[in-house]
Image: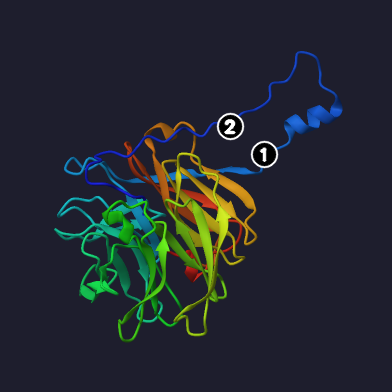
Amino acid sequence: MSRFLPKARTLAPAAALLLTMTLAACSAPPPSMEAASNKEDTSVQQAKRVMQVTSVHKVTGMTLLEGPTFGPDGNLYLVDVTAPPGAPKVLRVDTTAKTVSTAYTDDRSALTSAQFNPRNGRLYVTDFLSGAVRSMTADGEDVQEIFVGPVAGIPMQPDDISFDAEGNLYITDATGARSPYWEAKGRLVRIDGTTAEPAVLADNLESPNGISFSPDEASLWVSLNTGNRIDHLTLTEGGTAVATAHPAIYASAGASQVDSIAVDAEGNLYVGLHNRPAVLVYDVNGQLLKTISMPAEDTAGLSSATNIAIKPGTTEAYVTVSGSDGGFLYSFKALAKGTRQSNGG
């Protein structure tokens, strides 16, 4: 989730992504230069606008889409972090018909992420304000509070989530957001899928945000919003503890910050950005493979590309993009197929 502060009514404007091209000289260039000038820039891929999902809310002064996840019905579910009481908190999007409907709302939450539990098929969401994790049906019914309260004596501010195959929940906890959020007070928390018992797997993190398993589920990638890096953490058998951890990728993001993460079947990382409407794609070795940009004519009213979902079994990738123009859904072709781990968080 992109960080939002109560005092800030609007997101900082994002700088437009400019693609520079070398102008040809008046005289014909040598063959080698001509070939180079005609070569396609494969390092930048432009996403396509699918549809507008939300408008800026008058009450909160902004809209912020997050947590895209495909449900069993084939629809894409999103949360609007800054939706005011009574406005849609979870939205259901038919990407083919390009329609939006309300899946869930309430009068108290700031939902930051969404994902379907592989064990019971229910939709799980996190509430940044209360620290609660809730589950519900895809229709927003039978809402249950899975967990709420302090973990190791400290209240949670849950951001993104990821499930292992057994239904255990892994959460990035941005506890540093309380005072001030850039301090290294964040944590990685595991909620047992059977007992709902919490455990801190890592702490002293710089505002942890995105989280996603590797394809074999042996390790986790965790993005640190104010550290502008992605850490790699291997897990012990059963995923109850961290075996090893190290800073893996440092993002050269400038004034922007790393946000949420998706991982495709080949292990490539798709990293959303806050304060810049773009997605950075890295391979497992930390090599920057591509930058997914939004169309230049759209970027003036867009501030952040927060989160990515790749439809399982396909290369159809979707990114939630928000700013002063509203909340939008864009699509692009992923480098490899999506899996369950590519879907939401």
Three-letter residue code for mark 1: Asp
Q: Where does the image place residue 339, in percent across and percent down from the top left?
A: 52, 69
Q: Is residue 285 left or right of residue 8?
A: right
> Residue at the location (29% across, 75% down)?
152
Q: Of all residues shown, which one is farthest toward the right?
A: 31
Taking 142 as reference, is 20 above or below it? above
What is the quadrant of residue 41 in the picture? top right
Mark 2 / mark 1, whichever is N-terminal: 2
- How far apart in space, not on screen, are marks 2 and 1 (Cα)? 10 Å
Q: Where residue 308 appears, x then y in whole percent?
A: 45, 56
Residue occupying the point 48% across, 40% down: 294
Q: Residue 275: in sight, yes or no?
A: yes
Q: Secondary structure at mark 2?
A: loop
In the rendered structure, find residue 41 and report the number of the disc placed on it: 1
Q: What's the residue type where badge 2 is placed?
A: Leu
**Mark 2: few, some, or many residues within 10 Å (few <14, many ≥20)?**
few
Which residue is drawn at the image coordinates 24% and 39% (left, top)?
Answer: 9
Front residue of 113/104: it is 113
- Across and down, in percent, residue 121 comes to 35, 77
> Along the horizontal axis of the image, is 176 left or right of 57?
right
Q: Please, is residue 94 above or below residue 13 in the view?
A: below
Q: Secondary structure at mark 1?
A: loop
Q: Nearer the viewer, residue 180 or 142?
A: 180
Q: Where is mark 2, residue-wise?
A: 19
Q: Is residue 80 visible?
A: no
Which residue appears at 28% of the width and 66% of the height? 156
Marks 2/1 in contact by CB < 8 Å: the verdict is yes
Please identify the quadrant where the C terminus is shown.
bottom left
Task: Assess disc 1: are there few (<14), some (14-19) or many (≥20) residues with their C-alpha within 10 Å of its C-alpha.
Answer: few
| x, y percent for residue 82 | 25, 50
Count of numbered tags = 2
